[in-house]
Image: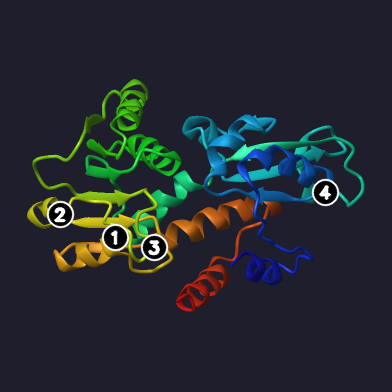
Amino acid sequence: MQNAALAALRLNWRYLAFDVLPGQLRAAIDGARVMGFIGLNLTVPHKLLAADMVDLLDDQARTSGAVNTIVFETRDGAGNWVPLAGVPAGQAAEVRCRGCNTDADAIVRSLQEDFARESWRGASVLLLGAGGAARTAALRLAREAVGALFLVNRTAARAAELAREIRREYPAVGVAEGYPGHPVDLVINATSLGLKPDDPLPIDLAWLKSHRPQFVYDMIYRPAETGLLRAARAAGCRAANGAGMLLYQGARALELWTGRPAPLAVMREALRKNLESYV
C-alpha cells in the first residue's frame, strides 16, 4: 500500500518492515533517526511503549497514550521544525522525533464509510478489549459524543481503568463495564482474537444472537472474515473488517511524512490486492 503510493508520488523512497523486540525499540528508533529515516510506523506491542521514547507527542497520541506513527523532523532555514523530507538530503543538523497517532481518526472515518453513517453522536457502543487499540477507539468515540460505551475485557481491572479515564475526560458519555442488557448500535472488536483460525470468539455468542447489534466492526483485517464477522452476519448484523482503518491510518501517516495528499485510490487498490492474496 505505502510503496504503491510512493511510486504514484514519484518519490525515491521505500517502505520496509522490520521485526523489533520490545526491549530493543528505543535503540531501533534512535537508529532510524541516525540513519536518516523519514519516519516510522509502529504496531503491537510498540504503540504504548513508544509514547515515552519520542521527543514530543501530537494531540491524538497524547490523548490516547499510543504512538503508531513517528515523523522525524529538522529545522528549516527559518528555524521552524519541519518533516525531514522538507529539507535537502544531508542538510539536517538537528533531528527530533514526533510521535503521532493516526489510528484514532482512521477508525471513525472507516466506520462512517463502511456503515454509511455520517455521525455516531448518541450511539451506543460495545467495545471488546481494553488495550492500546481499544483505548484509542474509546477515547476517539467519546470525543464523537457517543451516548454510551460498554467495555468488556478479559481482565476486568483494565476495563475499569479505561472506564474511569473516559468518565474523567468525557463526563457526558455514559460508561459501563460488562455486557448491556439491551441491543447496541455498534460492536467493535479491538482484541487480537480472530487472528488465528482456532481463536475463540471475542464476544459472548449467546449475547450476540439474542441482542443482535446493528453494526459489528472487527479491527482485524487479515483474515478478511473472522469468526466474529461470520457470527455477526449469521445473526443478521451488518459487519465490516478493519481494512478501512488500515487504509486511512496509513494514508494519514504518508501525508505527515511527505506534506502531500495521499493517493487514496492507489493505496486502496494495492491494499485490496494484498488482502485478497492472503490465505
Q: Which residue is mark 2?
A: 208
Q: First in sequence, mark 1 or 2: give its number.
A: 1
- The N terminus sits in image quarter: bottom right
Q: In what element is the residue under mark 3?
A: loop
Q: Looking at this view, is 50 or 252 the one in front?
A: 50
The reply, left or right, for residue 199 in relation to residue 16 is left
Q: Residue at x 67, y 71 (%)?
A: 8
* Amino acid at pointer 4: Gly
Q: First in sequence, mark 2 or 4: give its number.
A: 4
* Amino acid at pointer 2: Leu
The reply, left or right, for residue 190 in relation to residue 70 is left
Which-is-in-front pick, marks 4 and 1?
4
- The C terminus sits in image quarter: bottom left
Spatial separation of the CA atoms under disc 1 and disc 3 = 26 Å
Would you place residue 198 above or below residue 205 in this image? below
Q: Which residue is mark 3?
A: 196
The reply, left or right, for residue 171 in relation to residue 214 is right
Which-is-in-front pick, marks 1 and 2?
2
Q: Which residue is mark 1?
A: 115
Q: Which residue is mark 4?
A: 36
